[in-house]
Amino acid sequence: MNDRTWSALRTDRTLAFHTSHPEGPAQRLLILLHGVGGNETNLAPLAEAMPADTLIALARAPLTLGAGQYAWFQVSFGPQGPRPDLIAAENSRQQIAQFIAELQDEYTVSPASTVVAGFSQGGIMSASVGLTRPELVAGFGILAGRILPELEPQLAERAALARIRAFIGHGRSDTKLPVDWAHRADAWLSNLGIPHETHLYPGDHGISPAMYKDFASWFIALTSQEK
């Protein structure tokens, strides 16, 4: 997957996953969630920029679409925009939250040193967990994703949300999830009182080198100050 050493696929937790372990005890935990139709190896390049003391988990979504293709929920597109399968999205949200708690317990990493982030649909799920279960993480990253408007009734209390941080990265010319979704997410997080960074980049639906770099800098700064 890249120059890091990765475990074989583990299936003994709520989600299947690979890990990359630090040589000593893990001081930080980064959980990465892939996009629809991808798999857990897609975000392995993000690991390269992370500190050596970071435990990184690449989680596989529970729905199988085809060989090597998985999803957190099904989605269809119409005149009103994307229409997610909200039942599947909720099931995945609960599974990811349980998975985070399992890894924190196994590796003795605190929520204050934990971040969940993802690309596209993985970013949607990262935001869904962060906004409903802020006690589990220090922050969340939305990389070319969005926040589900349907999530609003499940949002945590504002006082709890104010303790977490968020990162939004999006391509200005994104044809899959137009950049307006990033503007909406930025406005929503501001209204909720969640400190966050929003970065827009040239390009379409993807994670550019600049987005990798900015997210890594944000993650390092967040998990360093939380120690």
Image (cartoon, grey):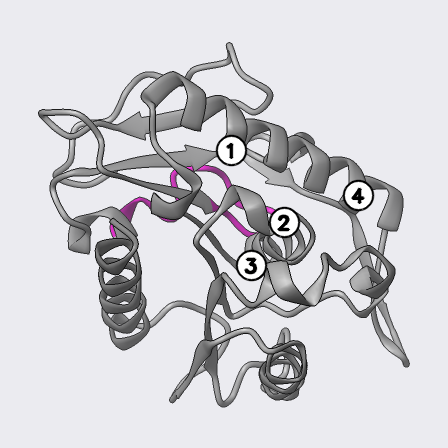
Q: Earlier in the sequence, mark 1 or mark 2?
A: 1
Residue at which label 2 appears: 129
Q: Residues within 10 Å of mark 4 (few under 14, many from 20)?
A: some
Q: Are marks 1 and 2 in contact (CB under 8 Å)?
A: yes
Dot 3 corresponds to which residue?
Answer: 123
Q: Amino acid at mark 3?
A: Gly
The residue singled out by tag 4 in the image is 90
In the image, what residue type sits under mark 4?
Glu
Q: How packed is label 3: few (under 14 Cα within 10 Å), some, or many (20 or more)? A: many
Q: In the rendered image, is residue 17 in sight?
A: no
Which mark sits nearer the N-terminus, 4 or 1? 4
**Does the magenta portion include 201?**
no
Query: Tag 4, which secondary structure?
Result: helix
Rounded to the nearest whole Å, what is the CA distance between mark 2 and mark 4?
10 Å
* Label 3: which secondary element: helix
Instruction: Give the residue at x 30% y 60%.
Output: 219
| Amino acid on which disc 2 is placed | Val
Amino acid type assigned to the residue bearing label 1 in the image: Ile
Give me the residue at 63% from left, 52% from top: 125
The part of the image, by quadrant, that contains residue 66 is top right
x and y, in percent, of residue 116 in the image: 47, 49
Q: Earlier in the sequence, mark 3 or mark 2?
A: 3
Left or right: 99 in relation to 212: right
